[in-house]
Image (spheres, helix red, strand yellow):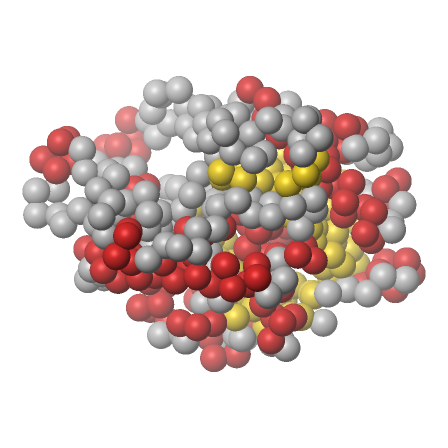
Amino acid sequence: MPNAVLVDIVRSPMGRGKPDGALAPLHPVELLAQVLRDLVARTGIDPETVDDVLIGCVGQVGEQSGTPGRHAWLSAGFPESVPSTTIERRCGSGQQAFAFAVQGVQAGAYDVAIAGGVESMSRVPMGANRKGSDPAGPGVHARFPGLVSQGVAAELIAEKYGLSRTVLDELSAESHARAHRAATAGLFAPQLAAITRPDGAIVDADETIRPATTAEKLAALRPAFASDEMRSKFPALEWKVTAGNSSQITDGAGAALVMSEESAERLGLTPRARVVSASVAGDDPVLMLTGIIPATHKVLARAKMSIEDIDQVEVNEAFASVPLAWLAEFAYERARLNALGGAIALGHPLGASGIRLLSSLLAGLESTGGRYGLQTMCEAGGMANAMIIERL
């Protein structure tokens, strides 16, 4: 089976997913097109040699409804002979796109592939593809009558693991501090594509990092999901999840060049990493966000590794309670978990987040000389992706 290697990875800066956000003026297709153009330019590959472009996207409606990878590829000026597909595994869509590209190379279906993700949450709001409908249906509700939103699930996780409001806010403040240190040290710069807005302004830095954030300031925020209905449903619950200890609604895009080791050698390209193992898992759909725990056990077992073999870990900070629940299971060194900051500071552009995590994981390994990295992403419905890479 061919070895699949990551040759390079690039992402846009993270923009606040609001009407006045730095990337909000850009159609999501144009945002992704600029990232694809940057990836091709920095690697020097002939775009004609790409077998497929796999793009993760959650809100496949409106401006993101028409195979955004295909339109972005064409907008970038690349050959019309190259196809694209859109992948949706909720928050893990971008990571799943990357895993599918790797598996395509390993299976011999691709020699060269691009995997990526895009989400313009300022232009296609979260939940726009549901419009008040019930995607679960009566059978699921009958089997799982306790289904709640992700925010309430994050509250239930905090309760289950005995996580205080102070602990959640401290992790969130530390996320901003770590991201600020990484940005100041130039660790994000090599992976960032400078994005040109329609008005000609250049966006070349993450907009989401707030270095002045403290746990004390976060403590003043009100719980975000404690509606009267939810308080009535869970009268004993201490409501702790706020906008400050949750991931940020974000605009962003990213792309990675994946190919066989033989193709990289033939093209004179130096791979940065190889994929050791990948897994997907399901878990309790009520707690919803704990799938990262069985997914991590599964990917470690497949790789015949233990958590002690892993030099750095990225657990998506969908909510502060998620990485803290993972830590309770694996007792991993806190300093090596989301070492460059997580989604609370850098944002969570849904379909693009898996690529953002991968770029941070690789940057962290390269800056410290670490060999193995693990990333895992919780997903709605009680699912998760996990993957181990080896820095080359």
Q: How many marks?
A: 0
Q: 135 above or below 219?
A: above
Q: 224 above or below 229?
A: below
Identify the residue at image location x=83%, y=47%.
41
Q: 258 above or below 18?
A: below
Identify the residue at image location x=81%, y=46%.
40
Q: 79 left or right of 232?
A: right
Q: 10 left or right of 76?
A: left
Figure quadrant of the N terminus: bottom right
Q: x, y percentage for residue 112?
A: 80, 50
Residue 144 seen by the camera: no
Residue closest to the eye, 141 or 356: 356
Q: x, y percentage for residue 256?
A: 70, 50
Q: x, y percentage for residue 229?
A: 14, 31
Asked where in the image residue 325 lies, by quadrant, the reply is: bottom left
Q: Residue furthest bottom?
A: 308
Q: x, y percentage for residue 369?
A: 63, 77
Identify the residue at image location x=86%, y=32%.
79
Residue 164 seen by the camera: yes
Q: 192 left or right of 245?
A: right
Figure quadrant of the C terminus: bottom right
Identify the residue at image location x=79%, y=28%.
74
Residue closest to the eye, 306 or 301: 306
Q: 272 left or right of 361?
A: right
Asked where in the image residue 295 lies, by quadrant, the reply is: bottom left
